[in-house]
Amino acid sequence: MLDQVFGHNILKKNLLEVSKNLPNVLIFAGPAGVGKKHTAYHLIDELCVGTLQGRLFMHPDIQFFEPDTKIFKLEMVHAIQEKAQTTPFELSRKFFILRHADRMNKESANACLKLFEDCPSNVTFILLVENSNILLKICLVYLSLKSLDSIESSDQSAF
């Protein structure tokens, strides 16, 4: 649930509003350690209230992808494409979290764009990036960008 996300109150409010008509692709942008992955998982938990039963990190309809090198390779995008075409196992939709999506080369980014254009309506991609400026500018035409700023010092003292 989003109430488990510390700080980022404006973002949480915006995510709750957009969750009523969830886009196929969201980008969470912010510096390392700001809580992009944590926020993504808790957004999914919010959307699937009562159905995950503590399996948020091991649910078959929630896939996490992270490059094992400095580049988000085309082969990984192809694997995501293949999985995105399958029917959700338990949930009404499938979720794909792509960490370090800003590390895609041109071929990977173009394949992702094609995937986003052709993806089924019951699939949501959440791209986690540290530098949204690196993404191909054309990507921003199709995506909904949400920035996570550093947590305010007043919020940090409560943590």
Image (spheres, rainbow, N blue to C red):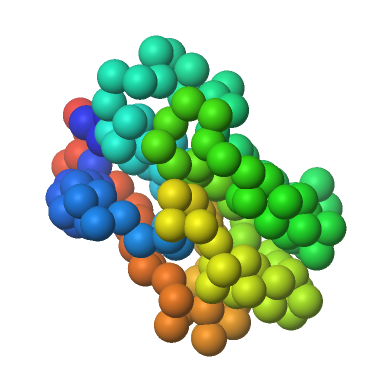
Residue 152 shows in the view: no
Q: Nearer the viewer, residue 125 or 118?
A: 118
**Residue 20 location in percent, x, y?**
20, 51
Q: Residue at x 43, y 71 (%)?
A: 143
- Locate the N terminus by quadrant: top left
From this viewpoint, which residue is outermost toward the top?
A: 53
Q: Residue at x 55, y 62 (%)?
A: 119
Q: Residue at x 50, y 42 (%)?
A: 94
Q: In the displayed structure, does residue 9 sit left or right of residue 156?
A: left
Looking at the rendering, which quadrant does residue 2 occupy? Answer: top left
Residue 72 shows in the view: yes
Q: In the displayed structure, does residue 65 sit left or right of residue 90?
A: right
Q: Residue at x 60, y 74 (%)?
A: 113
**Residue 32 location in percent, x, y?**
52, 51
**Residue 114 location in percent, x, y?**
63, 74
- Locate the C terminus by quadrant: top left
Instruction: Name above or below for residue 156 compared with residue 100.
Output: above
